[in-house]
Amino acid sequence: MEEINIEAAKHIRDEAGQANTELESLRAQLAEAEARALRLHADMENMRRRMQREREEIWHFAAADCLQKFLPVLDNLQRAVEVLPDTTWSQGVVLVSRQLEDTLVKFGLEPIPTVGCFDPQFHEAIAQDADSSLPENTITGVFERGYLFKGRVLRPSKVKVRAGGCSDE
Amino acid sequence: MSKIIGIDLGTTNSAVAYLEGGEPVIIPNTEGGRLTPSVVGFSKTGELLVGTIAKRQAVSNPDRTVASIKRHMGTSHKVRIDKKEYTPQEISAMILRKLKQDSEAYLGTTIEKAIITVPAYFTDSQRQATKDAGAIAGLEVLRIINEPTAAALAYGMDKGQDHTILVFDLGGGTFDVSILELGDGLFEVKATSGNNRLGGDDFDLRVQEYFVKEFKRDNGIDLSKDKVATQRLREAAEKAKIELSTLQQTNVNLPFITMDAEGPKHLDITITRAKFDELTSDLVELTMGPTRRALQDAGLDPAQIDKVILVGGSTRIPAVQDAVRRIIGKEPHKGVNPDEVVALGAAIQGGVLSGDVKNVVLLDVTPLSLGIETLGGVMTRLIERNTTIPTSKSQIFSTAADSQTTVEIHVLQGERSMAQDNVTLGRFNLDGIPPAPRGIPKIEVSFDIDVNGIVNVKAKDMATSKEQRITITSSTGLSDQEIERMVKDAEKYAAEDAKRKELVEAKNIAEQSAYAAEKLLKDLGDKAPADKVEAVKQAVSEARQALSSNDLDQIKGATEKLTTLMNELSTILYSQAGKDEPGEETHAHKHTSDGQTFDADYDVEKK
């Protein structure tokens, strides 16, 4: 009789132990699931915020792409102006060129200055100038004007730069 | 836990991506670009420049600018700048640090862990050097993985059964071809080959040379001696190459390209894709040798390659794709941006390591629309195709006939307008609807698709709350080909289906109008003017006749006539209702337009 009781008690203890293990594992699973849900939620929040920021940016810079496509037209008109012999015909073209530039400036286009020091933030070096008497790293010529749009480089100015001496020498 | 980024540390350009909600996403750099040039420069003032900015000053500062450092990884090569020596690891670390910082700025968190990709042929020492570069940049490199493996991961090719994949990577300056074998979810590199001096720049150069040659022939001037002209030609050549990937021809227009004694000269050339292919055919052919060699080394026939992946911007060139198609005899996998695919795959690997990929339930989409059949055999869609699951949707429907007590819910899958052209997933009846005129009972039909694609459809009578449901487990029993065919069919028959649907809808309207007219006549009884009643009855029978004709115009005409007559009749009905003074009303009618006098006369007579 007692033996049976012991057996039964053992059985109950085993079962309780099993239930405990199962409970533990379920708890762990729940914690993991909660953590995952939370992380996913955080991910979504961050994504929403970034989307918002990106949307504002897209709106803010929407004209950039369009302006950029007009730049070659402006470049070529300015090239024309540079080489045209000075006649009343060419003066008209000068006016058209200026008109185009003024219009683009009204949309937020801003020419990048190309005097003084070369700065890779705004300028792109296309050639070195070894002969110039100007100090090192000075812009000695402009191949193509660069532009900013709302403070961001739309296209860097393509310039010729006085060669910098190599400090290895 | 901090995010793990995936980095494609390339010879010409690098890219970085991370996993967002289970999907890999490219992180743009602070300049807004999705690719960062793998260039490092030191300004005169000792400032460190990395990426686009370093590239811009390369010409003016060549002694302090380092490009393509990847070619020296794992060697004892040293870069000497301002009396200081740098190892390739240190230079690479500068690129990695920028990628890390830009990612941190973009994500707004600190980044400590990364996966970095390397070419499949990299030796242990090259891999170790890459890992060291990561450590110098303050990144714990969790794993170095092969670029082709990353590309395969980005295409989800680690799932499914074992297969053999050929990765064809034509980048800015290097060409690699790798053959991978997937077994037990692991990729094994079977063979690699390539040409480390072949890339997109070579294609640009061919176009540029062509422009110079054409211009010389027409004008006798050699533009290649002119720095400004060369610069303009180089840009125009690259632009033309890109455009010819989608267009059959493009115009290159460079006014005032140069001057001579006669005045300004302009370049105006139209280049066709055929011409481009001719100019670059030997470059394309150069990729074929290594491809054959890789196949040979792997001991495989082209037919044994199960999948082909294109990596690198230059694989956008149609002639390159054609060549790959010809040699392997398979359509290459496209869809993921070839410039970004390696970084995206690295981000996925990061997700796998962090458990993100395993934990995130990979969300699937319904391949085909789901809906039910409604009056006239029309398929009414409740869930559109490509909806991310799990999802649910419900809509209220009603009965089509008076005193209808049962509705049949015919669950359909497909893209065609008519029920009969779609696949039946199941049918069930909801009965016990209290008898009511048609259109009155409210029956809510809800569709619910769970994560596993199991569809539950429920119909519920809102009045009695009685409901009936069906569970469809085999909605995805269709093969990919069948789904493809169904979607294609829908496009093919779109016009025809729209016509049939229009007819059915016209018929439904005609039927409803006839029904409503009869009901109105019955409600009115002898309150309605006899001649009007006669006219409406006539119109109803005409509408019924038109219905059996199946002629859209006839049905629409009959419906219109009936509707007009009904409106006239309703006007009388409404004007009678709530008016106590018949005289006044008659008066009012008499003051309306002439067309109304007939009605008014009748009103007087009746009262």
Image (cartoon, coloured by chain):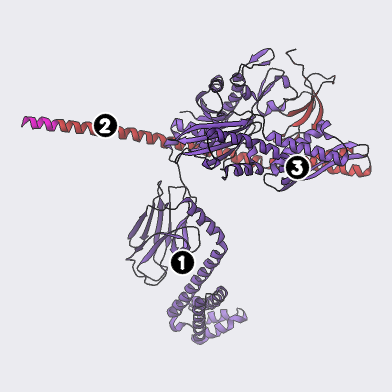
Chain colours: A red, B purple
At label 2, counting other C-alpha atoms closer than 10 Å, the crowd grade (few under 14, some 14-19, many 20 or more) is few
x then y, percent, for residue A45 = 49, 37
Question: Which chain is indicated by disc 2?
Answer: A
What secondary structure is found at the residue carrying circle 1? Answer: loop
Q: Comparing marks 3 and 1, which lies closer to the viewer?
A: 1
**Taking B500 as reference, is B78 left or right?**
right
Magenta-colored span:
A1-9
Judging by the rendered image, the residue that carries numbered circle 2 is A21
Q: Nearer the viewer, residue B185 or B581?
A: B185
At label 1, counting other C-alpha atoms closer than 10 Å, the crowd grade (few under 14, some 14-19, many 20 or more) is some
Task: State which quarter of the image contains the C terminus of chain A.
Answer: top right
Report whether mark 2 lies on the same chain as mark 1: no
Report whether mark 2 lies on the same chain as mark 3: yes
Give the residue type that dot 1 points to. Answer: Gly
x then y, percent, for residue B272 = 74, 46
Task: State which quarter of the image contains the N terminus of chain A.
Answer: top left
Q: Is residue B305 above or below residue B458?
A: above
Label drawn at residue A70: 3
Judging by the rendered image, the residue that carries numbered circle 1 is B377
x then y, percent, for residue B130 = 56, 23
Q: Is residue B179 magenta?
A: no
At label 3, counting other C-alpha atoms closer than 10 Å, the crowd grade (few under 14, some 14-19, many 20 or more) is some
Q: Earlier in the sequence, mark 2 or mark 3?
A: 2
Q: CA distance from mark 3 to mark 1?
A: 55 Å
Give the residue type that dot 3 points to. Answer: Phe
Give the residue type that dot 2 points to. Answer: Thr
